[in-house]
Image: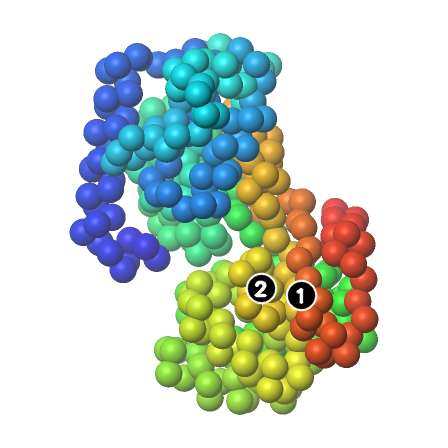
């Protein structure tokens, strides 16, 4: 999605990524056991993910942070030498062979750069949306037989979201969803998980048609859901869904903290800390996977439930606390 909107900028970032990798290899050669983390932006969630990933390492392993297109962001504590911090950080795979480091790319731009470069080191692509992954699937480089790849999606599964909605609205089964053409992989996942639900899906071909689609959808729904797609990524589109729900007295569910803060009722999300621990475990699986395994794809687990209590009171709903809802969502695994 990023690449389609800004092709020239994206190609420039890939060029800078290649230069960064070349400089790294020329400077020090292949590292001993440890982790190389690639970042290409300064998004707060990505920075927090990298910080927590570093803090969770086993003592004695190498941790290299490569900032594609510029210097790596400062993650060491105040007054601490950066080189010393890199040496003392903890490794991802203490039991793995010494000559098999793991590379982890954070976010879609870094992921694209990572799969396009040569090498056979195990690779984990983290902090990707489902649509990010779908765009990467078209690259032959992702399906190379000589490299093991794992993909960690940043959102919990649609099954987790439905478990949450069922816990909040146990007597309701009509779930309304506005989708776009790009949302089809997410819609298929939702449909597979929605056994016993009356799923109402309407497609909005463009932003101008969103209001008319919502007018059709709202009367047929007990609740609305915002998918992690082009609508969920657009503040204006998300607010349109929230306004439509509020006007009809319908709760709106989603997959992000931002939606809950903006007026959604609840969402199952995964925090950067949870994602960092899962990425570490996925790296171990990828490194140990036998030849021919293919790409290992995992949705974010465990989920943490966020609830907007003000919205709940406004809708006249008495719902369990976040901790209890989180336990219900994770108990189904």
Q: Residue at x 56, y 58 (%)?
A: 256
For marks 2 and 1, give the CA distance.
7 Å
Judging by the rendered image, the residue that carries numbered circle 1 is 308
What count of labels does the image hold?
2
Q: Secondary structure at mark 2?
A: helix
Residue 173 lies, with reference to residue 8, above or below; the image says below
Q: Seen in the image, is 277 located left or right of residue 36?
A: right
From this viewpoint, is residue 170 visible? no
Residue 243 position within the rendered picture, expressed as x and y whole percent measured from the top left: 54, 81
Which quadrant, please, contains the N terminus?
bottom left
Residue 188 position within the rendered picture, expressed as x and y whole percent measured from the top left: 55, 64
Q: Nearer the viewer, residue 267 or 121?
A: 267
Q: Residue at x 67, y 65 (%)?
A: 308
Residue 106 position within the rendered picture, expressed as x and y whole percent measured from the top left: 43, 39
If you read the primary sequence from the N terminus, does the residue marked by circle 2 or circle 1 appear first? 2
Q: Residue at x 44, y 81 (%)?
A: 210
Q: Residue 223's image quarter?
A: bottom right
Judging by the rendered image, the residue that carries numbered circle 2 is 261
Q: Are marks 2 and 1 in contact (CB under 8 Å)?
A: yes
Q: Secondary structure at mark 1?
A: loop
Q: Residues within 10 Å of mark 1 (few under 14, many from 20)?
A: some
Q: Nearer the viewer, residue 159 or 246?
A: 246
From this viewpoint, is residue 114 visible? yes
Residue 325 lies, with reference to residue 296, above or below; the image says below
Q: Residue at x 38, y 78 (%)?
A: 207
Residue 289 image label: none
């Amino acid at each position: 999605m990023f690449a389609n909107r800004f092709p020239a900028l994206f190609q420039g970032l890939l060029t800078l990524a290649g230069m960064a990798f070349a400089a790294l290899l020329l400077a020090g050669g292949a590292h001993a056991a440890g982790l190389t983390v690639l970042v290409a932006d300064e998004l707060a969630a990505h920075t927090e993910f990298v910080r927590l990933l570093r803090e969770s390492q086993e003592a004695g392993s190498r941790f290299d942070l490569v900032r594609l297109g510029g210097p790596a962001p400062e993650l060491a504590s105040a007054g601490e030498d950066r080189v010393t911090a890199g040496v003392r950080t903890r490794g991802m795979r203490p039991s793995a062979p010494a000559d098999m480091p793991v590379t982890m790319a954070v976010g879609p731009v870094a992921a694209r750069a990572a799969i396009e470069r040569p090498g056979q080191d195990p690779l984990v692509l983290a902090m990707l949306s489902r649509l990010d992954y779908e765009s990467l699937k078209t690259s032959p480089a992702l399906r190379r037989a000589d490299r093991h790849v794992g993909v960690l999606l940043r959102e919990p599964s649609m099954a987790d979201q439905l478990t949450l909605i069922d816990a909040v609205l146990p007597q309701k089964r009509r779930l309304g969803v506005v989708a776009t053409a790009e949302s089809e992989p997410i819609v298929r996942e939702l449909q597979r998980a929605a056994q016993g639900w009356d799923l109402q899906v309407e497609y909005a071909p463009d932003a101008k048609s969103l209001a008319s689609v919502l007018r059709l959808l709202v009367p047929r729904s007990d609740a609305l859901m915002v998918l992690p797609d082009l609508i969920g990524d657009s503040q204006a589109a998300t607010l349109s869904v929230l306004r439509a729900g509020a006007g009809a007295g319908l709760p709106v569910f989603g997959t992000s903290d931002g939606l809950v803060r903006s007026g959604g009722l609840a969402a199952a999300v995964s925090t950067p800390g949870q994602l960092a621990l899962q990425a570490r475990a996925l790296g171990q699986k990828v490194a140990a996977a036998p030849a021919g395994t293919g790409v290992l794809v995992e949705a974010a687990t465990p989920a943490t439930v966020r609830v907007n209590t003000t919205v709940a009171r406004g809708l006249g709903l008495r719902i369990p606390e976040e901790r209890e809802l989180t336990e219900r969502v994770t108990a189904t695994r």
